[in-house]
Amino acid sequence: MSTDSTAGGPSPTAVHRADGVTHAERYLAWLCKRSFLAMWSYSGIYRDQMTGKGGHGKEVADLIVVFQDHVLIFSDKDCHYPDTGNEALDWCRWFRKAVLSAAQQVWGAERWIRQHSDRLFLDRACKQPFPIDLPDPGKAKYHRIVVAHAASRRCRERLGGSGSLMIDPGIVGEQHYADTATVKPFTVGQLDPKRGFVHIFDDTTLNTVLGTLDTTADFVAYLTKKVRVLSAAQQLVPQGRRLVPLVPQGRPVRSPAGLGG
């Protein structure tokens, strides 16, 4: 963290944490501030363009959490859920705009952080550097997190329960959205195993998880275990694959406080 020299010695410069620009970004920042992530989270992270022409920086991620050797990268999207009368088509269109777009941002943020961890800022003008050192690249563990809004109401109408998305680790990549004849609406799996597992939370599930667990260490352990369990399930799921529930502390997936992402 940068310091200012005073008569009493160096004193830390105040860190001005952003609250987010869009409604979704403000919701994410608010959610983290009221949880155990408050001390470790920074919203509205930018990178400098280094064009020599001045101007504003480009947003890297909606929110980043740095805890020990762990870097949690969040992208939050609130996209209108279509209502064409064709459930599969509505799902595919929403998934591309909300989930896939957010995942692209997360993957891009991870790439930038790995290569240019010294060029992160808390403001669009790139005047306030990211206030803490990031983990050594050789030790850092990255967790990619998408928070996608607007599907819960339709999911509740069709499937009941809390409206949380279901998990099927047998669904991979374009199987989420490419073919309306075969997609499973309101069900998510692995977006791109080669680029790293992406956790997909919806309107209800992130709030549920943060309210269920007690510490940042618990949350990191949950994310780590989730990847391990679902990666193993991917190898075991038969052709007629079934949904695999996963919740913190063994709570049921489709309960009013279920975890779908």
Image: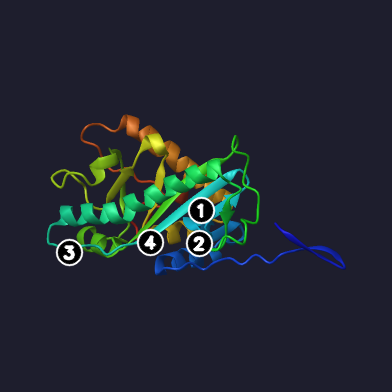
The tag on residue 83 is: 3
Q: Which of 23 and 211 is in front in this view?
A: 23
Q: Which residue type does callout 3 highlight?
A: Asp
Q: Do we see residue 108 in this rendering?
A: yes
Distance (Cα) linking label 2 and label 3: 37 Å
Instruction: Give residue 204's mark.
Output: 4
The crowd level at tag 4 (other Cα within 10 Å; few <14, some 14-19, many 20+) is: many
Q: Give the color scheme: rainbow, by chain, secondary structure or one colour.
A: rainbow
Residue 88: percent from left, percent from top: 17, 52
Left or right of residue 161, residue 140 in this image: right
- Mark nearer the N terminus (4 vs 2): 2
The Cα–Cα distance between marks 3 and 1, rounded to whole angstroms, is 39 Å
Please, what is the three-letter code of the amino acid marked with disc 1? Gln
In the displayed structure, would residue 224 be above or below residue 38?
Answer: above
Q: Identify the residue at image location x=53%, y=45%.
A: 113
For mark 1, what is the residue? 49
Frontmost of labels 3 and 1 is: 1
**Residue 62, can we see it?**
no
The numbered mark, 3 or 1, whose residue comes first in the sequence reads 1
Q: Residues within 10 Å of mark 1 (few under 14, many from 20)?
A: some
Q: Distance between the residues labelled 4 and 3?
A: 21 Å
Q: Which of marks 4 and 1 is in front?
A: 1
